[in-house]
Structures are given as C-alpha cells and as structure tokens.
Image (cartoon, rainbow, N blue to C red):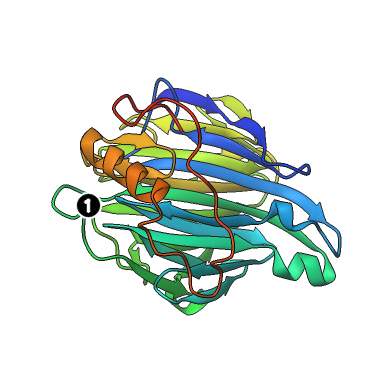
Amino acid sequence: MIEMVIEQRRRDLGGGFEVGRVLPFAKRRMVGPFIFFDHMGPIDLPPGVDASLDVRPHPHIGLATVSYLFSGELMHRDSLGYEQAIRPQEVNWMTAGSGITHSERLERARAVGDRLHGIQAWVALPDGMEEIAPAFSHHSSSDLPQWEEAGVVGTLIAGSGYGLTAGAATHSPLFYAHLEMAPGATAEIPAGHKERALYVAAGEIELDSIHYGAGRMLVLGTGASRVKASQQATIMVLGGEPVGERFIYWNFVSSSKDRLAQAAADWKAGRMKLPDADDAEFIPLPDGPPPSAPAMS
C-alpha cells in the first residue's frame, strides 16, 4: 500500500522565497523517471520584488524539466532562443538532453505583485536518449486534458492516465496529474506502472485510514488505488517506469559520473551557451563534492 512517506524539506532560496524539496530523498531517489520534485511557495511577492529572487541562467543535461503553476507567473528564457511566460495550468517542458541553459524570472511580480505557487519536477531521460538534442515546448490548457467527476477536477499534465494523453512529448512511460478534490471526494491513482506516488500540495487526504497533510509525498505500492480528501485538497499524482540508476550533481543528471564531470567542467569554463536574451549574468558552479562522487541535490 504505502511504501514510504517523504516530508518536504523547506529551503530558503533567498529573500524569504522558500521551496520544499521532496525528491531526491536519501532513502528514495526516484519515483519512476521522476528524479527531482520541488514545491515552490506559496509566497506573496510585492511589486518591485528584488531581482535576487530570480533564477539566473544555469545549465542542465540528461533530463527534462516540467514546470507547472497553481498561481502566479514565471518568465522562461533559454539558450535555444525561447522566451515564454508560464501561467497557472500550463506546462513548460524543457528537454535538456546534451545540454541547455535557461533562466526563470519574476517579471510579473516585479511589475504588479504576484502570488507564486507551483511545482517543478525533473524527469530523467532514459538510456539511449540522455544526449538527445535539447528542446523546449509550451503547453496551454488545450494540451492538458481536464475532467470533472464527483467532486474531483483533474488536469493531466504529462504522459497518459485516466484514459487520456497530454500534449507534451515524453521519452518514457509516465503519468503526471493535478487533482483538485472537494471534501469527501475520492480519486483513483492510475495503475499499470511499476512506481507511483502522490504529493499533497494543499489540504489533507486520507489513505489506508491515515490522514496526511500538505508537504508530504506518499510512495505507493501496487495495492493503493484510491485516495480520499478529508478536506479541500490539491494533490499531484505521478509515476512511471524506472529508467535505471542516475546520478545527480547540481543541475546535471546522468547515468555516467564521467559525463557529470564533463558538464561541470564545461559550465565552469564557459563552454555552455547562455540565453541570448539573458546573458548578462549566470549562476556559478557551486563549491562541493566533485562529480566523481555525486551528492544529493
């Protein structure tokens, strides 16, 4: 039923902007291909918010980033030349592959104020696809199938589930969905994948007669199939097929420690192109363990 409960670990990125790190976890690095899961906010940002809260240009390899917001707006710019705001119930899907750089700026908040709340996940690319060409796609509500049934409003963010398929091109079997649940409503957790989990972003749910509040990820066994909202709840359900062992160093994911070392050396030496529209600054390679012994992100 429930194999593990993972509590988010809150981290202040500066200026009071907090994220809750869920994956990777010391005892559970991945769920299917999902190797990173951060809960952003919620945080109220006043007009004129300091630019230090922006995520400056930084690199990735070997993964796809999946950005999804409940509220607020972020401006994405990348080294392929894409410039795209993401808003609630939209998806920015960025495939890093052999290497990409991007930034995420709080431009709307700086202009008029905002309430930022959302999830950023990383999906590890499968064997044979870790070094594919980088790509970016934006998906509005027309690409995100929605349904409503018995107090549950669902949005399929990526992959296939609930008899539906989302618009983003994925590289391995997975599902990822956002469920808004009224008090007392029950919802199915899609079966058919080796690894599954649900994350409580807000409110409270009940599973196996135990109540779980916000900030907890429940890693599910094969027997768990339905969840009940004990109060109004926002949950994310996710899972898929494992892609094999992956290592993480900073923003890099790979099945090869040598490839991590090469990516770190490339970034440090300035060999990775910055976004043309955002190339005046960047996040330097952090101090820490060398890529030959990857640390938990």
Q: Label 1 amino acid?
A: Glu
Residue 218: percent from the left, percent from the top?
Answer: 48, 31
Question: Does the image show residue 117?
Answer: yes
71, 109: nearer the viewer: 109
Q: Residue at x 38, y 49 (%)?
A: 269
Q: Is residue 26 left or right of residue 207?
A: left
Residue 66: percent from the left, percent from the top?
Answer: 45, 57
Residue 85: percent from the left, percent from the top?
Answer: 59, 73
Residue 142: percent from the left, percent from the top?
Answer: 47, 79
Residue occupying the far front of the picture? 269
Q: At numbered mark 1, what does the secondary structure look like: helix, strand or loop?
A: loop
Q: Quadrant of the N terminus?
A: top left
- Report the residue marked by disc 1: 130
Q: Is residue 163 above or below residue 235?
A: below
Question: Does the image show residue 153?
Answer: no
Using the rendered view, name the quadrant where residue 28 is placed.
top left
Using the rendered view, name the quadrant where residue 224 is placed.
top left
